[in-house]
Structures are given as C-alpha cells and as structure tokens.
Amino acid sequence: MEGISRRERLLEVARRLFASRGFDGTSVRRIAEEAGISVAGMFHYFSSKEEMLFEIMDTFMDEGLRRLKEILDRPDDPIQKLKQVCKFHAEYFAGHKDHLVILSTEGKSLSPEHRTIFIQKQRQYVEAVRKVLEDLRELGLLKEIDITILAFLFFGMVLWTSRWYNPKGRVPPEELGEILSEVLLGGILRDGKSSGACDRIRCFGD
C-alpha cells in the first residue's frame, strides 16, 4: 500500500474486510488497526463505516458505468457492442472480486439515502444492456424473449462468474469475455450464430 494516501489505505482495508468478513462482521476498530491509524484519525476521513461502504460501491459502479457508456457510444453494430460489453465485464470484474462480493451482498447495509442512489445506478446498468438488446430486436435478430429478463440473466452470469473465476488460471479474462459473449449470443440470436448475424447488419459499418 505504499504511495497511497491514508484515505485510500482505509478504503482498501475496508474493502478487503467487508468482502471477507461482511459489513456487520467488520468493526471500525479492526479497519483502523489494519490501516495503521487511530479510530479518531479514521473519522477524520469518514463520518461512519457506512460512508466507507457506500464510497467503495459507488466509485466502482461509476467507473463501470463510464466505461459501459464509452462502449455504447461507439459506432459499432449491436452485436459488436454486446460482445464488447461481455468482454469489458469479464475483464473489469475479474480484477475486482472484492467489489463484486460487496455489491452483491451489502446493498442492505446502506443507509436509505445511499441505497436509493445505489438502486438508481443498478437501473442504469440494466437499461444500458437493455438498449443493446432492443437494438438487436429492432433488426429482427433477437429471439422472442423478454428483454428485461435477458438483461438480468446477463448480470446474473457475470456476477456469479466472479465467485468461481480465477484470473490467474488457464483462461485469461479476455478469453473469458469471448466465451461469455459466445454463450450469450448463441442463446439469444435467432440464428444462434453471432458471426452469421454480423453479416446481416453490414449497414452499420458501411
């Protein structure tokens, strides 16, 4: 943790402890001790343990939304966009497993105000994926499946993958992204083949 501020050190320690011990199972004193700072010193940077939890979750989601928007703003066809969305999530989530554990388990620990913000950003994520799926439907490429259900299935796949996937194993994150996109596209496209479908939407690149 050399070269980082005390505030960043506190957030790193809190993130690791929240992921391994849970928010309720992590004391303020434990965070302060492992960060090498007094409890009083910790409260100089954060008003509460819950504020730390929210910042960890909110910062991670903001970065994900920013990068997701970059993909969706590209002049690519919907299939390529969905492939890039899969690739991004596989790579981004693989490097932030603690964040994902916290996101999937600790929303209940947020204050009502912070929980409202968190839910709003979750909805932005879902709407972004829904938009790509709607573009596929408009082109007649999508099977007759409810788009909202597909969006939630996508996030279910991605979030669960983070529980068992080892980024240092034999399958690198970028390859995992390719597998994820092939499985997803193969199941939702009418012809079941992402490459064949790309040939039918040349107008997006011409």
Image (spheres, rainbow, N blue to C red):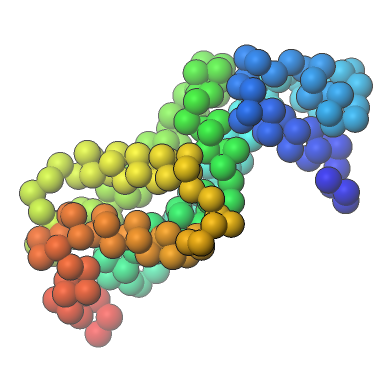
The image shows residue 12, relative to residue 96, as above or below, that is: above
Q: Position of residue 86 (x, y in %)?
A: 38, 57
Residue that extends furthest to the front in the rendered view of this protein: 170
Residue lying at 86% horizontally and 24% vertically, measured from the top left: 33
The image shows residue 151, relative to residue 46, as above or below, that is: below
Residue 12 appears in view = yes
Residue lying at 78% horizontally and 40% vertically, measured from the top left: 8
Relative to 44, 129 lies left or right: left
Residue that extends furthest to the bottom in the rendered view of this protein: 206
Q: Quadrant of residue 137?
A: bottom left
Q: Position of residue 26 (x, y in %)?
A: 69, 18
Q: Position of residue 21 (x, y in %)?
A: 64, 23
Q: Position of residue 77 (x, y in %)?
A: 28, 70
Residue 87 appears in view = no
Residue lying at 35% horizontally and 49% vertically, measured from the top left: 128
Q: Quadrant of residue 153?
A: top left
Q: How many marks?
A: 0
Quadrant where the image shows the N terminus: top right
Residue lying at 58% horizontally and 46% vertically, measured from the top left: 96
Quadrant where the image shows the C terminus: bottom left
Front-most of residues 117 and 87? 87
